[in-house]
Amino acid sequence: MSASRDLPSETLQSKNLHPETRLIHAGTLRSQFGETSEALFLTQGFVYDTAEQCEARFVGTEPGYLYSRFSNPTVNMFETRMAAFEGAESARATASGMAAVHNAVIGQVKAGDHVVAAKALFGSCRWVVEDFLPRFGVASTLVNGLDLDEWRRAVRPNTTVFFRESPTNPTPAVLDIAAIAAIAHDAGAKLVVDNVFATPIFQSPLALGADCVVYSATKHIDGQGRCLGGIILASEKFIQDHIHNLLRQTGPAMSPFNAWVLLKGLETLPVRVERQTANAGVIADLLAGHPKVTRLIYPGRADHPQAATIKKQMRGGSNLIAFEIKGSKPGAFRFLNALKLVRMTNNLGDAKSLITHPATTTHQRLTPQARAELGISDGLVRLSVGLEHADDIAADLTAALEKV
């Protein structure tokens, strides 16, 4: 089946088109049937007209698709559209967000190298840096991501990668991307940023100096709890030097079906995230004054500890709120068990409002001391505000807090 681009990618990536437009049109491929929606190519492989064409495809002298483990038209549309929106030269999709994180880091290192990462990471990300990489001779140092001097002191002659989230999971601290990128580059290292909490709607790490940005597309990009996915975005050189062949040979491939679902999610991403964020602002103000809430952290409020950094590098506060319930773990559990509308799960960025207890879920593998250092108390919960009416979310949270 032949396919051609609906519009040249150069046109769709130009500054003449707004980001919302790129999220609907960028990278579209159409078959000879002229379908309106993106075509779903559920195939494991592709056939060739001649042996010479097959040879040329494999050695890379002729463009075209070979095998869906590393090249597929539907997946390619998702990659191209995300790159156009993010302002990246290139992108590669993966089976999950953690596949994106793992490959973005491990693709840059070899035995004898050193990675510096912020301590405040999603539990699986921290495991990759702290436990997995050292098994292969890659040392790692964890730092307080808010302390620029700690980043500087952690640098060694063999440091190759800096890795951090911002805002962080689960207590949304906001790290200075430009400043940390400068430290990394002075050391000859590359900075990888997990931007999932901010989403590409509210933060652009590449424009701030990061070398690579990763997302769990499972979260806001899908936004409706349907499928897994991840994506790595960077310069064409970065992708070719560190990512392309690694993914081709090891196979953490995104399903074409999942890519198609994610393409549909991108079309409504701004509408959903902006509405969720507006709801989150209402809920954060409600919770900030509640007598059963002892601490609240929300990047959309002026009382956030890094408000100056947020003003400098973010365009919105996100839909994630962290807050602490009176009564430690028993109080938090009474609150969680009393919720009716807001549901307990470890996902985020969904159309439905979701909540989790990080100390016993996403960060349970950390020691109590490590959790305390990150501000993850037994009373802390992380709320992902959804698309329901803000009054209904507020009523559910208020009623559950009465049970504490």
Image (cartoon, rainbow, N blue to C red):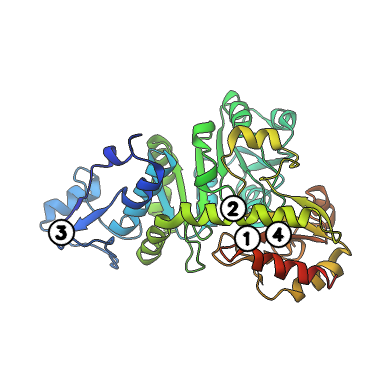
- Mark 3 or 1, nearer chain start: 3
- Mark 4 or 2, nearer chain start: 2
| Left or right, 55 with reference to 261 | left
- Mark 3 or 4, nearer chain start: 3
Question: 212 or 65, which lies in front?
Answer: 212
Q: Which residue is mark 1?
A: 385
SS under mark 2: helix
SS under mark 1: loop
Q: Residues within 10 Å of mark 1 (few under 14, many from 20)?
A: many
Pointers 2 and 3 in contact (CB under 8 A)? no
* Residue 159 in view in this figure: no
Image quarter for residue 163? top right
Q: Amino acid at mark 1?
A: Val
Image quarter for residue 152? top right
Q: CA distance from mark 3 to mark 1?
A: 49 Å
Q: Amino acid at mark 2?
A: Thr
Question: 248 or 138, which lies in front?
Answer: 248
Question: 320 or 56, which lies in front?
Answer: 320
Q: Residue at x 62, y 60 (%)?
A: 385
Q: CA distance from mark 4 to mark 1?
A: 10 Å
Q: Residue at x 30, y 49 (%)?
A: 27
Pointers 3 and 4 in contact (CB under 8 A)? no
Specify the quadrant that holds the N terminus.
bottom left
Q: Residue furthest left?
A: 50
Q: CA distance from mark 2 to mark 3?
A: 48 Å
Specify the quadrant that holds the C terminus.
bottom right
Which label number is shown at residue 277?
Answer: 2
Which label number is shown at residue 382?
Answer: 4
Which label number is shown at residue 48?
Answer: 3
Pointers 4 and 2 in contact (CB under 8 A)? no
